[in-house]
Amino acid sequence: QVQLVESGGGLVQAGGSLRLSCAASGNIIRMDTIAWYRQAPGKQRRELVAEQTSGGYTKYGDSVKGRFIISRDNAKNTFHLEMNSLNPEDTAVYFCYAYIVAAASGHYWGQGTQVSVTS
């Protein structure tokens, strides 16, 4: 049974930083594509950044490019999102995603963690 759990969300002032973590557990062979999404109140969930294992290609959305950085630690089955220069528009629930190779390979999502940025 594979699970993804986010952590690191919270309340921060504009201009501040937060580091989110996503921990994958279970009988995992490997993590392939990993990504972070967010959903602001009244809006659809949007992809922020995705990283492919094949070739190491990383794609950032325009709204976060230069401010957010994705990283991974395959040995620990974890990955992270470093968020800098936060502003109130970044307020949202943040979700981690991964395509996990396991006995039951597939798409897995975390439950979400709240990030609130005050002006």
Image: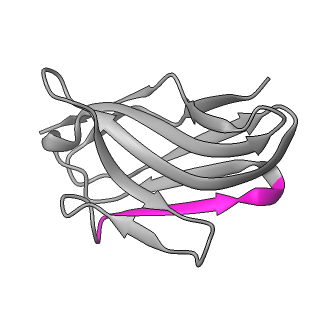
In terms of depth relative to the viewer, which is nearer, 54 or 115? 54
Left or right: 4 as drawn, with respect to 35: right
Q: Height in image: 23 above or below 67?
A: above
Magenta span: helix, strand or loop, mainly? strand
- Where is residue 73? Give x, y as percent: 72, 59
* Quadrant housing the C terminus: top left
Left or right: 6 as drawn, with respect to 60: right
Residue drawn at x 64%, y 31% is 4
Q: Quadrant of residue 25?
A: top right
Residue drawn at x 80%, y 51% is 76
Indicate whether residue 67 is drawn in magenta: yes
The residues colored magenta run 66-75
Q: Residue furthest bottom?
A: 55
In terms of depth relative to the viewer, which is nearer, 87 or 44? 44
Indicate whether residue 44 is drawn in magenta: no
Residue drawn at x 62%, y 29% is 5
- Where is residue 28? Give x, y as percent: 83, 42
In terms of depth relative to the viewer, which is nearer, 50 or 93? 50
- Where is residue 74? Give x, y as percent: 76, 58
Q: How was the colour assigned to the protein in this rendering?
A: one colour
Residue drawn at x 15%, y 27% is 43
Q: Height in image: 17 above or below 60?
A: above
In terms of depth relative to the viewer, which is nearer, 12 or 98? 98
* Quadrant housing the N terminus: top right
- Where is residue 108? Give x, y as percent: 59, 33
Left or right: 92 as drawn, with respect to 81: left
Q: Quadrant of residue 92?
A: top left
